[in-house]
Image (cartoon, rainbow, N blue to C red):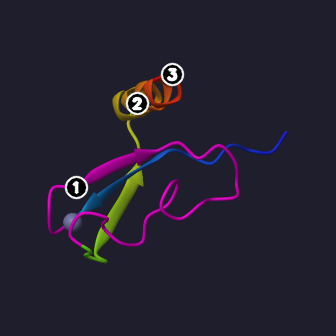
Amino acid sequence: MPRQPHPFTFMCTRCSWTKTTIPLSDALVIGRDWFTQCPKCGSESLKHVPASQREILKARLEQFFRLHS
Ligand SMILES: [Zn+2]
């Protein structure tokens, strides 16, 4: 079994954009699983931290509703 990558929360240091990603595999897709630039303001100063349990839960719910709407 391949090891599942850890979920991360990305945060823009310029605007208030945040996003938690739950990668499905080691093949990270930029813009979906990984961000190098803020999609909102274009800033490249993003921070990423391991997602908290609460953020993971929220991201899972968002994923679920996207798939089922
Ligand atoms: Zn931003």
Mark 1, Cα crowd under 10 Å, few <14 / some 14-19 / many 20+, is: some
Q: Amino acid at mark 1?
A: Trp
Q: Residue at x 53, y 28 (%)?
A: 67
Is 16 left or right of 61, judged from the image as shown?
A: left
Write the start and end of the magenta stretch as one range: 13-41
Is 8 left or right of 45, judged from the image as shown?
A: right
Residue wearing tag 2: 62
Residue wearing tag 3: 68
Position above or below: 18 against 62: below
In the image, farthest residue toward the left: 15
Residue 12 position, x and y percent, is 24, 63
Q: CA distance from mark 1 to mark 2?
A: 16 Å
Q: Nearer the viewer, residue 64 or 10?
A: 64
Residue wearing tag 1: 17
Residue 23 on the magenta span: yes
| Rendering quarter of residue 10 | bottom left
Q: Which quarter of the rendering shows the C terminus?
A: top left
| Tag 1 and tag 2, C-beta contact below 8 Å | no
Pointer 1 residue Cβ closer than 8 Å to ligand 1 = yes
Position above or below: 31 against 7: below
Task: Using the image, tell me which numbered label, if any, was put on residue 53.
Answer: none
